[in-house]
Amino acid sequence: MNWRAVRAVAAKDLLEVRKNRMATWSILGLSVFFSVGMPLLIGLLPFAAGPSGGDLGPFEQLTRLLPPGQQDLPIGSRMVVLMLGYFLAPLFLIIPLMVSSIVGAESFVGEKERGTLEGLLFLPATDLELYAGKVLAGFVPAVAAAFLNFALYAVMVNLVSAPIVGGAWFPTVPALALAAWVGPAVALLGVSASVLVSTRVETVLEANQVSGLLSLVIVALMVGQGSGLLMLSLPVLFLIGLAIYGVDVLLVRFGAAVFSRDRLMARA
């Protein structure tokens, strides 16, 4: 495989995404909401300075997730730690999923809508190099955006919650594993599925619908974490990431195997 050709295809796609103002502002808006808005909203809630005694009801059992030094915090402080450090952590997987899905959805059907598909298909690159370039174009910015947002979120969480918790405490080890191990897996899942769909549909809107279906995976993780049915410990996160990477490999191999520029040309 000629990686120079792969990088050239990816660079072309990234340039097109930068020109898409709606997509850019959507990503920025979501990033600001998750990274800045949520810590401010939750960390500054009145219950953060609540009494030191009492019961958290159904959430009481989840306090065992907290380090020993945080289990004696006031009720409000424990709730803030649980919400920012554990309940909402899976929500950050939406960032790599959204970015990779937007870029992936534009990959081939977007070229068709812009009238540039024929020029792409006549590039001196093999089918595999074209496909790999499209996948790379969605994966790299998705992972970069995920890491940047996670870093900003960590800073905001500590700034907002340090006064009520007693110091900087985030990121936790499970949160780091979620960002470093599961995040890239979700990014690859989003772009591999979106690129595959983009070769089969007629409009970008149809291709974008795949991200809505994939988001159900993240919703399931959040529900499981919040209900106590699924504790995102290191072993669980490792298995979740491993399972997603397994699906990624299958999707990428299948997509590369069935991709044909001749078939796309005939449908253009």
Image (cartoon, rainbow, N blue to C red):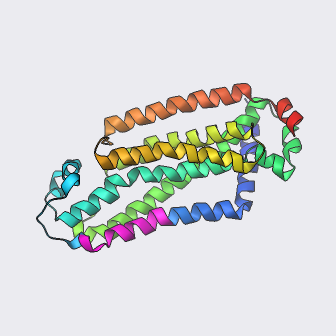
Instruction: Report x, y in % for residue 78.
Output: 22, 60
Q: Residue at x 70, y 46 (%)?
A: 206
Closer-to-camera residue (80/242): 80
- Quadrant of the image containing the N terminus: top right
Residue 238 in view here: yes
At a point 38% along the width and 60% down the height, the residue shown is 154
Quadrant in which residue 267 is drawn: top right
Residue 7 percent coordinates (x, y): 71, 42
Locate residue 112, reporting x and y percent: 83, 46
Q: Is residue 68 left or right of residue 86?
A: left
Magenta stretch: give its range.
33-47
Q: Where residue 211 sits: x, y (%)?
A: 59, 46
In the picture, the quarter occupied by the C terminus is top right
Q: Is residue 173 magenta?
A: no
> In the displayed image of the protein, which residue is found farthest to the front?
57
| Left or right: 242, with 212 as reference point | left
